[in-house]
Amino acid sequence: MGSKGELIFCYGTLKKGQPNNKIIIDETTGHAKFICQGRIKHKYPLIIASQYNIPFLLYAEGKGYNVQGDVYEVDEQKRDFLDDFEGHPTYYERMLTEIVVDEENAYDGEKLPKTLMCWVYFLKDFNQDMLDLQFYQNYDSFGSHGQRYVESEKTLSVDDLR
C-alpha cells in the first residue's frame, strides 16, 4: 500500500456489491483503490433508518458490533467528493478510527498491518431513539431485513434524523 492517499472505511452503500459502490469507483470524481475488508476495532451501532433505509453508523462507542466493511485508498479529489456525498461535516463527521484488517481479502495479496487508521463517517448528532433500532454487524441493502436502500434526489437534513 502506497502513501499516496488516505484510507476510507466504507460500511454501508459504498461497499462492494452495494447500491452506491459505483460512486466510489467512478474515476471522474477521483481515484479509489480497494485495499481490504476489515472491521472497526471498537463496537458501534450500525442501524438502518429514514424513509430511504440509509445505513447510519452512530457515534456511541461500546454499543452494537465491530462493524464490517471495505477499506479503500483514495486521493484528495475522491476524499473531497466523498465528504460532499456524505454531508461532512453537516450530517456525518469523518473521524480517524482503527480498523482490524482481514488479510485474506487484501488487494493483490498485499501484506498489510493488523490494523489500519482509516477515515470513517459517523453520525454524531442523532435522535437517541435511534439506539432502540436493530443493530447490524455487516450492512447489506439486499439482506433479509427487507429494508432495501432507496436512492433519492432529496438532500437529507439533520432535522430528518432528530
Image (tube, rainbow, N blue to C red):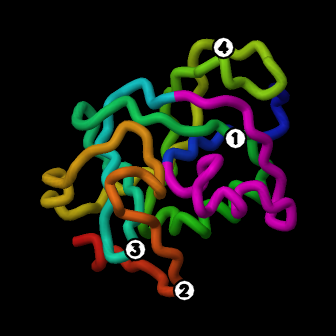
Question: In the structure shown, which secondary structural element does the residue marked by tag 2 occupy?
Answer: loop
Q: CA distance from mark 3 to mark 1?
A: 25 Å
The answer to whether 128 is drawn above or below residue 150 in the figure is: above
Q: Earlier in the sequence, mark 3 or mark 2?
A: 3
Question: In the structure shown, which secondary structural element does the residue marked by tag 4 occupy?
Answer: loop
Q: Nearer the viewer, residue 25 or 31?
A: 25
Q: Which residues are magenta?
A: 12-38
Residues at circles 2 and 1 in contact by the CB criterion of under 8 Å? no
Residues at circles 3 and 1 in contact by the CB criterion of under 8 Å? no
- The amino acid pointed to by label 3 is Tyr
Q: Position of residue 154 (x, y in %)?
A: 48, 86
- Residue 17 magenta: yes
Q: Which residue is mark 3?
A: 52
Q: Which residue is mark 4?
A: 113
Q: CA distance from mark 4 to mark 1?
A: 15 Å
Q: Which residue is mark 2?
A: 153
Q: Position of residue 105 (x, y in %)?
A: 68, 24
- The amino acid pointed to by label 4 is Pro
Q: Earlier in the sequence, mark 2 or mark 1?
A: 1
Q: CA distance from mark 2 to mark 1?
A: 26 Å
Q: Position of residue 28 (x, y in %)?
A: 86, 67
Question: In the structure shown, which secondary structural element does the residue marked by tag 3 occupy?
Answer: loop
Q: Is residue 146 left or right of residue 90?
A: left
Q: Is residue 93 left or right of residue 84?
A: left
- The amino acid pointed to by label 1 is Tyr
The answer to whether 96 is drawn above or below residue 76 in the figure is: above
**Which circle marks residue 72 in the picture?**
1
Few, some or many C-alpha atoms within 10 Å of disc 2 (few <14, some 14-19, many ≥20)? Answer: few
Q: Nearer the viewer, residue 111 or 84?
A: 111
Q: Earlier in the sequence, mark 4 or mark 1?
A: 1
